[in-house]
Image: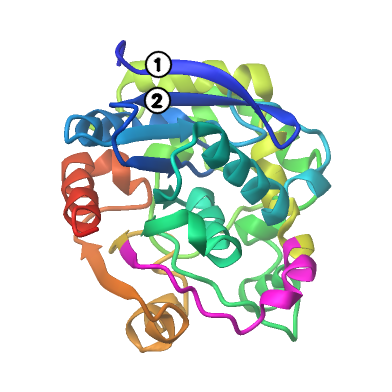
Amino acid sequence: MKTITHRHLTVNGLALHVAEKGPLNGPAILFLHGFPELWYTWRSQMLALSAKGYRAIAPDLRGYGDSANPSSSTEYTSLHVVGDLVALIQSLDVGAVFVVGHDWGAMMGWYLCLYRPDLVKAFVSLTVPFRPRNPKVKPVDAMKASFGVDYYMCRFQKRGDMEDEIAKYGSKEVLKKIITGQKPGLPIMPKENPFGINLKTTTPLPCWFSEEDLNYYADKFDKTGFTGGLNYYRALDMNWELTAPWSQIQVKVPVKFIVGDLDLTYTTPGVKEYVHGGGFKLDVPLLDDVVVLKDVGHFINQERADDINSLIYDFFSKF
């Protein structure tokens, strides 16, 4: 970990913290984290892939960690975030890059492939398949109708509500519950104690997530708060409005999709049918492979680091 370098770059009008490891002339891999995470989620992948000769680049996305933290959700659209990524790629003078994304990082990876396929050699998406735009209904309305108002993405919409709930229990307890307390199926958040935290009991951490890891996350979120990360959810409907020109557009980038069979996204109604029933391949014609790992949940790149490292390397080494 001490061999990973850190610097701040000014891109797209804001300061972005970037972690790097590997030879400057090596093929570049851009790693994009999700919620509620940081560049740190890629620590194993950065070490493993840099040892193979790749230049591993992992930013804290806007709103996270040591990067700039705009206050308004209107500054977290896919156009803003992809604008950051394009400016980052151009500032590194690396040409096109390989991309790996998880959770919201995967979502932004899909948008990067849509908007600037010339900058992406190949894409590995973890946990989140491509989501074609439905021109008939806004996403939050669709989720409320399908899953109810207590569905987690719906509960994240109103500024301040979830921040207040997190403050009741503290960053560390909430992060521990989200990252290690995962279960398949729809994430429903009741009005009282939405994260299901019991402060009277102590749940041991899994072998793949240490107390040191938890403390690193908690220290950063204690400083920044969670609003930046939650703003990605609050920009869902705005993304829908802005992406009307890309309706019914295919992703023309080579893709590998990797997910755990217990993942909350994969086990959401309709997702397996889309991924395995032909819809995914229709929207992403260069889809190379779909890999479903057994007995693994949402934070797959941490829980099954060695497997993910090998799968990423096997795919990118083709190019």
Residue displayed at 34% across by 27% down: 24
Q: Is residue 247 magenta?
A: yes
Q: Nearer the viewer, residue 172 or 114?
A: 114
Q: Position of residue 17 (x, y in %)?
A: 56, 24
Question: Alpha-carbon neighbours of circle 2 within 10 Å: few (<14), some, or many (≥20)?
Answer: many
**What's the mark number on residue 110?**
none
Q: Amino acid at mark 2?
A: Glu
| Left or right placement of residue 192 versus residue 270 in this view | right
Q: Amino acid at mark 1?
A: Thr
Q: Quadrant of residue 9?
A: top right
Residue displayed at 25% across by 71% down: 289
Q: Is residue 317 magenta?
A: no
Q: Position of residue 107 (x, y in %)?
A: 54, 58
Q: Do the residues under discs 1 and 2 have CB atoms within 8 angstroms?
A: yes
Q: Is residue 297 above or below residue 131?
A: above
Q: Position of residue 265 (x, y in %)?
A: 45, 63
Residue displayed at 44% across by 33% down: 58
Q: Position of residue 189 (x, y in %)?
A: 61, 53
Q: Quadrant of residue 213?
A: top left
Q: Quadrant of the N terminus?
A: top left
**What's the mark number on residue 5?**
1
| Left or right placement of residue 58 versus residue 157 in this view | left
Residue for badge 2: 20
Range covered by the magenta-colored residues: 239-257
Question: Alpha-carbon neighbours of circle 1 within 10 Å: few (<14), some, or many (≥20)?
Answer: few
Q: Which of the two discs, 1 and 2, labels the residue nearer the N terminus?
A: 1
Q: Quadrant of the C terminus?
A: bottom left
Residue displayed at 24% across by 65% down: 292
Q: Is residue 287 above or below residue 224?
A: below
Element type at marker 1?
strand
Residue 313 in sight in this render: yes
